[in-house]
Every structure is written in C-alpha cells, then in structure tokens.
Image (cartoon, rainbow, N blue to C red):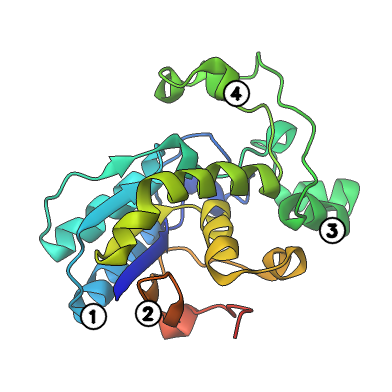
Amino acid sequence: MSFLILVRHGQSTWNLEKKFTGWVDVDLTKKGRAEAKKAGFLIKEKNIKIDFYYSSLQLRANDTLKIIQRILNDKKTFSRAWQLNERHYGALTGLNKVEMSKKIGEDKVFEFRRSWDMKPDALNKKSPYHPININLYKNIPKEMIPDTESLKDTYERVTKYFNEEIKNKLEDKNILISAHGNSIRALCKRLFGLDNDQISNLEIPTGNPLVIELSKNLKIIKCEYLDKERAKNLVIF
C-alpha cells in the first residue's frame, strides 16, 4: 500500500488575472502562498511520510512544494521535470479568458480549455511567451518544445514520465507531486481510467491536496481532497 498526493499549485498571478498561462513562468499570489501553506498543514495532519517529491519546472509549482516541505519540516531534494508542466495554450497564451469568451463565445473557450484533442493555434516563435524564448527551458531540446498542445498531448508526455519515473516507486513508497491543473488532470485520467467526456468535466482546485491510497498494483483503495470546503467532484465515484 502507498499514497500518492497530487497538489495543484496555489493561485498564481495569472490565475488571478484570468489569463491563459501555460508554460509562462509566473509567481504565486499572496492567496496562493496561503493555499500552499494550508495544504502543508493538511498533509501534516495525515502523518504520511513522503519518500519522493516531484514538480514541474515552473516556479508556481516549485514554490508551492517548497512551502509544503517547510511545513512538513522535510528538506529532501525534489525532482523537477518539464514533462509535468502545465498544458501549452498556444496562441491563447497571455490572453484574458473573460475577454476571449466575449470575443469568440463561452462554448468555444470551454472547448479550447477542456476538449480532449483540440489544440489552439500555434504560438508564434517570436513571442516572448514562447518557451524557446524563456530561459527556464534552455536545456530542453528545441524539437521537444511545443508551440501548442491539446489535453491529449499533455496526457501523453505526463503519463510517459509517470510510467518511466514514478509508477514503480508507488509499489511501496509515498509520493507527492506538485504540478498544474492539466498535468494533474492527465494523471487522474490515467489513474482513474476516465474517459474523454469525464476528463472534460474534471476540475482541479488550486492548493488542495488530493490524497490517493493505492494497492501494490496501483488500484485505488480510497481518495479524498483534504480541504473539504474547496473539494471538487472527482467524477469517478
């Protein structure tokens, strides 16, 4: 038996501004840091010893994890992987979701955000928001850096990394992953066997730990959000 704890980063500055963020590296807000701190205390109450920590390359997820580790008084080094990054929103990056809803319609924006295999237009490589122009991603081979992604694309890179680097450790170790709404949705699709319609309805709240208890063959015994007041419908039960 083991535990997998999934935490979407606390509220970011672009979450607050309702912008499509994707691979742009933005910081946590004051509220986001408070969410991360509360997440740390909620995890501490469960008294689960974490053996391995993972995060994306992105600041908002890294800082959320650092705050949680500080609450847990755990100084282990954590693994950072671009494969756990948020979904790349292509040409939508940096645009305001409310303004785009008015411009192209709420249904179209929802389709871009939640559909399984639809991807926005590619982001121009000259854009300052393109990952090839962001120093954080300088060590990733350029041919692996996307111009845009669907949730399906995100699922494929996230689950490949999970299967290669994390899955086997879950046979007898406890793992915490601090990542993003769409990378966690991808993991939930893999773990819970969600279909494409279910995944479109799955929403991951910021800074609310999802604790999943697993058997050795990765069958889910139990799962719960620790902050009950902000728990979302997991669709699966």
Q: CA distance from mark 2 to mark 3?
A: 31 Å
User: According to the image, label 4 marks what residue?
Assistant: 130
**Earlier along the polypeptide chain: callout 3 or callout 4?**
3
Q: Which residue is mark 3?
A: 106
Residue 176 percent location from the top left of the image: 31, 60
Q: Confirm whether residue 21 shows in the render.
A: no
- Of tags 1 and 3, the one toward the viewer is 1
Task: Give the position of the C terminus as an image quadrant.
Answer: bottom right
Apparent side of residue 127 relative to residue 55 in the rendered image (left or right): right
Q: Amino acid at mark 3?
A: Glu
Front: mark 4 or 1: 1
- Please name the residue that numbered disc 2 is placed on: 226
Residue position for label 1: 46
Q: Which quadrant of the figure has residue 228? A: bottom left
Q: Amino acid at mark 2?
A: Leu
* Residue type at tag 4: His
Residue plotted at (59% across, 18% down) = 143
Q: Is residue 209 visible?
A: yes
Marks 2 and 4 sit apart, C-alpha to C-alpha, by: 35 Å
Q: Which residue appears at 78% of the width and 49% of the height?
A: 112
Mark 3 is surrounded, within 10 Å at the Cα level, by few (under 14), some (14 to 19) or many (20 or more) other residues, namely: some
Q: Secondary structure at mark 3?
A: helix
**Is 219 or 234 nearer to us in this picture?**
219
Marks 1 and 2 in Cβ contact (< 8 Å):
yes
Residue count near mark 1 (Cα–Cα under 10 Å), binned few <14, some 14–19, many ≥20: few
